[in-house]
Amino acid sequence: MTATVPNSIGAAQAGSPPKDRGGAARVVAGGLDLGQTASAAGLEAIVGGIDPRLLAAQAAPAAPGSMSIQNVSCYYGAHLAVADVALEIPGRAVTAFIGPSGCGKSTLLRAINRMHEVIPGARATGSIKLDGVDLYERGIDPVSVRSKVGMVFQKPNPFPAMSIKDNVLAGLIIRGARPRGSAADELVERCLNRAHLWEEVKDRLKKSGDSLSGGQQQRLCIARAIAVQPDVVLMDEPCSALDPISTLAIEELMRDLARDYTVVVVTHNMAQANRISDITAFFSLASAGQPGRLVESGLTADIFSAPKVAATRDYIDGRFG
Ligand SMILES: Nc1ncnc2c1ncn2[C@@H]1O[C@H](COP(=O)(O)OP(=O)(O)O)[C@@H](O)[C@H]1O
Ligand SMILES: [Mg+2]
């Protein structure tokens, strides 16, 4: 029997009390009694210059849909494409992957929902947890992972032979769980609304998905991805085939989606990463053929204003490749 990824893990975690990072004993520092309520962590923040935003994030209960990537390496046959990535992806936020071509952003993204291993000879090692469950644990069904962790690609890829409505339902149809009647209508309307597309297509749901513009097709693909109720939506350069107006529409949508989903987006557009993401992860590689590595990650505001590594600054400022 294969295990599936439980639905309830995130909800259980969201309801748990905040972690106590240092206890609430009476804190005395330098002869100064800071009182019963000051926690050791709070004190660190006051005297140690720790970024209070990070502290707040650590003290808050993990939002559902949080991911933890540990020691992840991805191979194509004997070729090590991505080496030893460790990265925390907060739930219900937008995380941007940036870095030069070939550094393994798409590969890592595909490893997150176990699509990497579908490529013949490809494999990943390490651990990727979603709400504490290791998606690579023995017995986890990769198909259930892909319904919890959906994916949207660079080129919009609606199924051309299917109507707009059936495109939204495609994930369920493929799994043999096609909803009928009003249940189907309601789901289609909800997902198209959520993808900011309903008003534009509500009068032509029976038309082919192919009949839409590129930007509309991409929003249709997003509606299709969320129809199976994922926790995480992965997007690989979702705007790079779109015009500027459609790009802005998708950017707005990504921000909006982060209220209910964890969004991870690969982008080559620095302004876009800066505009839409909460966390930025910068990947790079020493030279062609070398494995890609995570150089640094952090709050987007910090990565863009004061990166710790010179290579990050060079890349963001356009001095790379
Ligand atoms: N299907 C594949 N088969 C073999 N090697 C691949 C495949 N896809 C990507 N690679 C290799 O993996 C490395 C990372 O590629 P990729 O993940 O596409 O980088 P990025 O998305 O950052 O441009 C590159 O060296 C690339 O040639
Ligand atoms: Mg790529």
Image (spheres, rainbow, N blue to C red):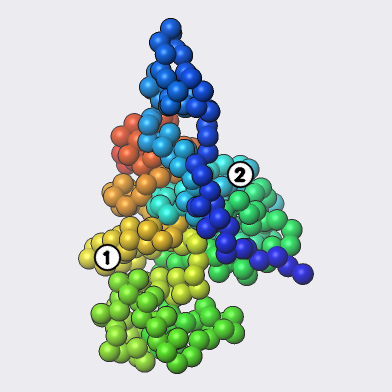
Q: Give the number of callouts.
A: 2
Marks 2/1 in contact by CB < 8 Å: the verdict is no
Residue shown at 41% from the left, 37% from the top: 56
State whether residue 297 is above or below residue 119: above
The first of marks 2 and 1 along the sequence is 2
Residue 312 visible in the current orientation: no
Residue 84 visible in the current orientation: yes
| 318 left or right of 181 in image | left
**Residue at image mark 1:** 249
**Residue at image mark 2:** 70
Please rate how many residues cluster around mark 1, counting C-alpha atoms within 10 Å: few if below 14, some from 14 to 19, many from 20. some
State whether residue 13 is above or below residue 199: above
- Which residue reaches farthest left? 245
Q: As rendered, which of 96 and 54 lies closer to the eye?
A: 54
Horizontal and vertical percent position of residue 290: 57, 43
Name the amino acid, label 1. Answer: Ala
> If the image is split into quadrants, where does the C terminus sit?
top left
State whether residue 268 is above or below residue 218: above
Residue shown at 29% from the left, 83% from the top: 201
Q: As rendered, which of 167 and 153 lies closer to the eye?
A: 167
Horizontal and vertical percent position of residue 32: 40, 10
> If the image is split into quadrants, where does the N terminus sit?
bottom right
